Image: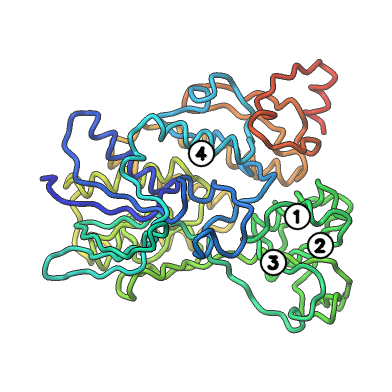
Amino acid sequence: MTNFKVGIIGAGPSGLAMLRAFESEQKKGNPVPEIKCFEKQDNWGGMWNYTWRTGVGKYGEPLHGSMYKYLWSNGPKECLEFADYSFTEHFGQPISSFPPREVLFDYIQGRIKKSKARDFIQFNTVARWVDYLEDKKQFRVIFDDLVKNETFEEIFDYLVVGTGHFSTPNLPYFKGIENFPGAVMHAHDFRGADQFIDQKVLLIGSSYSAEDIGVQCYKHGAKSITISYRTSSIGSKWPEGIKEKELVTHFEGSTAFFKDGHSEDFDAVIFCTGYQHKLPFLPDNLRLKSKNCLYPNHLYKGVIFNDNERLIYLGMQDQYYTFNMFDTQAWFARDYILGRVSLPSKEERTADINKWMAYEKSTVTGADHVDFQTDYIKELISLTDYPPFDLDKVADMFKQWLHDKEVNILNYRDQVFTSVVDGTEASIHHTPWMKEMDDSLERYLDEVTLDDEELMKVNNY
């Protein structure tokens, strides 16, 4: 039975995965429900859309994206590769394992452009409110068309939330920060390192964004980088010019005071303090409430909202795997919506959720976390017809990547890996990452031949 309607909120990697999952079913000649997708930005891609704007967008909505210039993948592309669309298929040649944002965005678009997905997406449209009509077992969703400045409603039998959770900053307060004379921002509003050349930059937080923004500012000419952590340091072997300190206690003018009694003057402060799960369009009884973790509570198989079986969340986990995990979630959600996956009782679902949460609680190291998410994806794939791929080899690549970062935080992006999708070994990029200041697609795909001496420099940089 397919005479029902599915609504998808968000056309980033998760929402696009949902569209692709239904399309793959349609290509087999099988019927699918009516599908509508709504995206608040003017293009698909979610976080991979770069904008120079900060704060609010063209129509006054809080900006979704946290993307910045010069961002390169901080994990091997071979670990996020779509199982049904390889990088080699897209680019027609081997490329390096750590491409820049524009290259990854091109890859995301390459797969979805082969479909008719755009016909199902209404852009510049933001979800304002959701009601669940218990008597009809349907969702009533209020939207704003930002271009027309009009409000309208849609009715859905199933609702898929694919908005992500890296867009609403978590911004703690430190006494005196309001009088700091230099730039103060959250990583969400960071748009590139250019403005911090020759400056002493303080990063508060020890997340991946602190690591990446710190190294980028160092690469592009900041005078010094200090990373202030709350509970544990990143622990990398930092080069001279980057250091870690215990948490800031307060500010006096341009001076930051630290827990260990040290004080130092800075020119800029960047908060790398993470993001909130913020879903303001959902009422209390439908809203996922979670901190960033590998297995949020109340989601059966990490996807189906336990208190309302017709509400589906995609991509709400902390992530090692990304694009391919969103795919496996979307394939599972599709088969559930189409009636191929039978749900056990709520009590059994709760027990399953608790089992996974206990497993996550037992993990300690980065390698443990990788194994956890690998096992999670294995289970989803076992329940659907998503193309299988060698997850154990992907897990090994993640672990090698974690090791490479410990060895040298400045050159791990120069390492190469081999695709488990088509067996292609990545090429060595024509320029060592620390020396590559142009992140454009055109520059990246320039075919520059390296001689033996130059290859040795790349490998040993």
Question: To which residue does mark 1 refer?
Answer: 214
Q: Secondary structure at mark 4?
A: loop
- Determine contact: label 4, label 3, CB under 8 Å: no
Q: Tell me the amino acid under the disc marked 1.
A: Gly
How far, Cα to Cα, is label 1 from label 4?
24 Å
Q: Secondary structure at mark 1?
A: helix
- Determine contact: label 2, label 1, CB under 8 Å: yes
Q: Nearer the viewer, residue 112 or 336?
A: 112
Of badges 2 and 4, nearer the viewer stands 2
Residue sitting at the far front:
148
Q: Nearer the viewer, residue 381 or 179?
A: 179
On residue 201, the disc is 2
User: Which residue is at 54% across, 51% downward?
Assistant: 368
Q: Quadrant of the C terminus?
A: top right
Mark 2 surroundings: few (<14), some (14-19) or many (≥20) residues within 10 A: many
How far, Cα to Cα, is label 2 from label 4?
32 Å
Q: Secondary structure at mark 3?
A: strand
**In the shown orientation, is residue 16 left or right of residue 392?**
left
Question: To which residue does mark 4 refer?
Answer: 80
Q: Nearer the viewer, residue 400 or 194?
A: 194
Q: Tell me the amino acid under the disc marked 2.
A: Val
Of badges 3 and 1, nearer the viewer stands 3
Question: To which residue does mark 3 refer?
Answer: 185
